[in-house]
Image: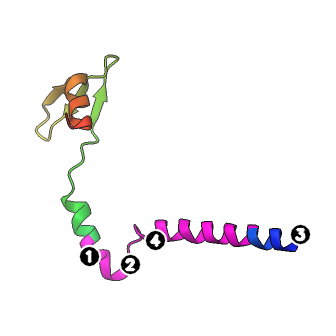
């Protein structure tokens, strides 16, 4: 009975350590802070858009104009085909 309990505790601790190691891979330490900030500033992400009922995206540009990206274009971009 005790052996089964000890084995279960060992498995739980091992799983917990594995989860912590996986989470630590993305953790930003003080020596990586400058490069992480630089990468965030250089990444381009459009978060100013609307989606209609057909899945088309209306993307607002910096100059105030709007670009329409159809649903099929969006699917090609996400699937890479």
**x, y percentage for residue 57?**
25, 27
State yes or no: discs 3 and 1 in contact (Cβ < 8 Å). no
**Residue displayed at 30% across by 29% down:** 50
Q: Say whether disc 4 or disc 2 marks the residue closer to the N-terminus.
A: 4
Which residue matches tag 2?
29
Left or right: 70 in relation to 22: left
Which residue matches tag 1?
34
Kindly report which numbered mark, 2 or 3, lies closer to the viewer in this rendering.
3
Kindly report which numbered mark, 4 or 2, lies closer to the viewer in this rendering.
4
Relative depth, front residue between 10 and 68:
10
Q: What residue range appears in magenta? A: 8-35
**x, y percentage for residue 54?**
31, 17
Q: CA distance from mark 4 to mark 3?
A: 35 Å
- Which quarter of the figure has residue 68? top left
Q: CA distance from mark 2 to mark 1?
A: 10 Å
Q: CA distance from mark 4 to mark 2?
A: 10 Å
Mark 4: few/some/many CA within 10 Å (<14, 14-19, 20+): few
């Amino acid at each position: 009975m005790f052996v089964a309990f000890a084995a279960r505790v060992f498995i739980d601790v091992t799983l917990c350590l594995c989860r912590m190691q996986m989470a630590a891979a993305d953790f930003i330490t003080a020596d990586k802070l400058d490069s992480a900030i630089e990468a965030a500033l250089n990444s381009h992400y459009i978060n100013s858009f609307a989606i209609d009922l057909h899945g088309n995206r209306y993307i607002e540009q910096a100059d105030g104009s709007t670009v329409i990206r159809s649903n099929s274009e969006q699917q090609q971009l996400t699937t890479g085909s």
